[in-house]
Amino acid sequence: MFSHIPADQRPTLEIFVDGQSVQARRGDTVAAALLASGLDVRRDSAVSGVPRLPYCMMGVCFECLVTINGVGNRQGCLIPVEPGMQVEIQRGKRELGK
């Protein structure tokens, strides 16, 4: 459903999503890179367990929460990708120490 615009010639970089290599474009946010990856990037709501996807892409709705480099509850729509970044899709409530 989501994809990069072919005319976009920004350089790519590699991030890792749940241990899987994903190519992102420099300047993308984590949420944008996840949506364009083609992977199942749905997180599970901590309250009801229903699947959620990034929605507003501007930091208002908190539907894009992910764990980045071991730090949980990060808003993926506000964080630019960096080479080698480790992203984990949050499943349910945040665990202590993450």
Image (cartoon, helix red, strand yellow):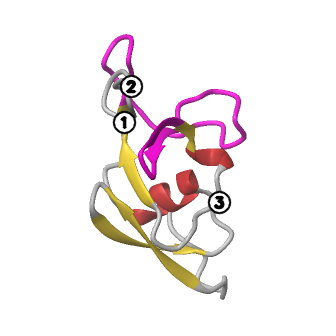
- The disc at residue 90 is 1
Marks 3 and 2, Cα distance to the nearest angstrom? Answer: 22 Å
Mark 1 residue crowding within 10 angstroms, few (<14) / some (14–19) / many (20+): many
Q: Earlier in the sequence, mark 3 or mark 2?
A: 3
Q: Which residue is situated farthest in the top direction here?
A: 47
Q: Is residue 48 above or below residue 1?
A: above
Q: Position of residue 37 (x, y in %)?
A: 41, 64
Q: Do callouts 1 and 3 mark residues in contact (Cβ within 8 Å)?
A: no
Label 3: how many Cα within 10 Å (few below 14, some 14–19, many 20+)? some
Q: Is residue 20 left or right of residue 97?
A: left
Instruction: Identify the residue at horizontal 41%, vertical 46% (top origin).
Output: 70
Q: Amino acid at mark 3?
A: Pro
**Magenta span contains residue 55:** yes
The outermost residue toward the left is 19
What is the quadrant of residue 42 in the picture? top left
| Range of magenta residues | 44-73
